[in-house]
Image: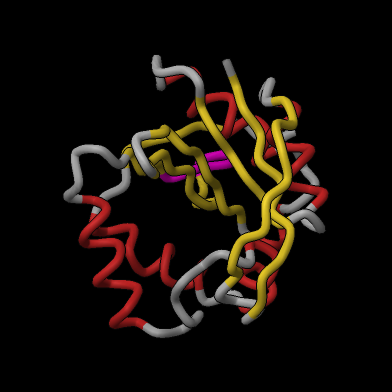
Amino acid sequence: MAAVSLRPTTDADFDALFDLESDVEGADMIAFLPRTPGDRDAFTTHWTRITTDATVMTRVIEADGAFAGYAVSFLIDGERQVGYWILRDLWGRGIASAALAALVAEIPERPLWGSTAADNLGSQRVLVHAGFVFDRTERSHAPRRGAEIDENVYRLD
């Protein structure tokens, strides 16, 4: 497996992050991305906001020293959430699991929450590998799918 590490996100990462978030298949799998892949203005507005928000933690994931994706932690209704996005050609190699474990180790708050579209089995495995346990299924609007879908919610105490 690749050597996986996290580092703080910088403005110099925006091009790689934009390319990652422009992957339509990846965005569709995540389902909850509120921006259209490839919309540079919406991307820049979002990433500028979250990288200047003290409640949001953004990390670039590197695999063997190369950009592999990002990990993020943010608040929704006062609850600390985690998320991640890996380059599609790196899926299934354990990189997301290693990155999420590293992110979780940086966050002292508990509980932590993570959620996935119910059909995103790979992301569910990543959460379970990091110690999260299934908490519930709820119906949520998935902007990328233009529909209400089942969202599986996981918790780490």
25 over 98 or under it: above or below: below
Q: Nearer the viewer, residue 90 or 35?
A: 35
Q: Residue at x 65, y 68 (%)?
A: 26
| Picture layout, residue 28 above or below residue 116 | below
Camera-side residue: 152 or 84? 152
Residue 19: % across, % down: 48, 72
Q: Residue at x 36, y 43 (%)?
A: 58
- Looking at this view, is 154 or 47 the one in front? 154
Left of 128 or right of it: where is 114?
A: left
Quadrant of the rendered structure where residue 76 is?
A: top left
**Quarter of the C terminus within the rendering:** top right
The picture quadrant where one finds residue 109 is top left
Residue at x-position 79% and y-position 38%: 125
Tell me if residue 119 comes above or below residue 157 in the rendering: below
Single out the residue that lies furthest toward the front: 139
Q: Give, as a single range, the part of the protein colored magenta.
A: 60-65
> Residue 29: x, y in percent?
70, 65
| Residue 5 picture location, percent across and down | 50, 32
| The magenta stretch spans residue 131 | no
Task: Look at the magenta stretch and give its main secondary structure.
Answer: strand
